[in-house]
Image (tube, rainbow, N blue to C red):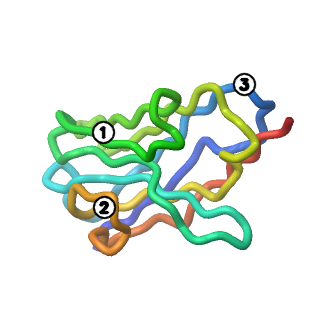
């Protein structure tokens, strides 16, 4: 089984930027698509972004398109989420996942525990 560990979360003011990382170990990385999801208190987990196994294809939730960029470095077994122009609505626990290239969390079989992102106004 693969282990996924997120890092890079923190407190930032609206308009600021953060870069999240997800380190994978113990399993295949480069043959799987990867995704980012987020969950705010009292709300359902929602899709944020996904990237294909080779990194050539990406897709984003409408709420983050143009502000967030997903990328991966297969040589380092690491997934990234660059978050710019942050707004308070981005506040959530962000989780990375390994699976199929999909916007549905059901298509991802392995998950990290998450990293907290808090955006103040």
Reading the chain from its start, which is encountered first: label 2 or label 3?
3
Mark 2 vs mark 1, foreground winner is 2
Which quadrant of the figure contains the N terminus?
Answer: bottom left
Q: Which mark is residue 15?
A: 3
Specify whether 61 is left or right of 7: left
Is there a contact, CB below 8 Å, between mark 2 and mark 3? no
**Spatial separation of the CA atoms under disc 3 and disc 1:** 29 Å
The residue identified by callout 2 is: 98
From the viewer's side, name the closer residue of 63 and 39: 63
Q: Which mark is residue 10?
A: none
**Spatial separation of the CA atoms under disc 2 and disc 1:** 15 Å
Reading the chain from its start, which is encountered first: label 3 or label 1?
3
From the viewer's side, name the closer residue of 3 and 56: 56
Q: Is residue 35 above or below residue 59?
A: below
Q: Is residue 113 above or below residue 84?
A: below
Residue lying at the far right of the rendered structure: 121
Q: Which quadrant of the view contains residue 120? A: top right
Residue shown at 45% from the left, 57% from the top = 47
Crowding at dot 3, Cα within 10 Å, few <14 / some 14-19 / many 20+, comes out as some
Mark 1: secondary structure: helix
The residue identified by callout 1 is: 76
Specify whether 20 is left or right of 121: left
Mark 3 vs mark 1, foreground winner is 3
């Amino acid at each position: 089984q693969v282990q996924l560990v997120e890092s890079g979360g923190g407190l930032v003011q609206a308009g600021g930027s953060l870069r999240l990382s997800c380190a994978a170990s113990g399993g295949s990385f480069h043959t799987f698509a990867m995704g980012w999801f987020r969950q705010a208190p009292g709300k359902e987990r929602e899709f944020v972004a996904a990237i294909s196994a080779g990194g050539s294809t990406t897709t984003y939730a409408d709420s983050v398109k143009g502000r967030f960029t997903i990328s991966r470095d297969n040589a380092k077994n690491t997934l990234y989420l660059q978050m710019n122009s942050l707004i308070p609505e981005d506040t959530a626990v962000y989780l990375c996942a390994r699976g199929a290239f999909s916007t549905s969390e059901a298509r991802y079989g392995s998950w990290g525990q998450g990293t907290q992102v808090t955006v103040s106004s």
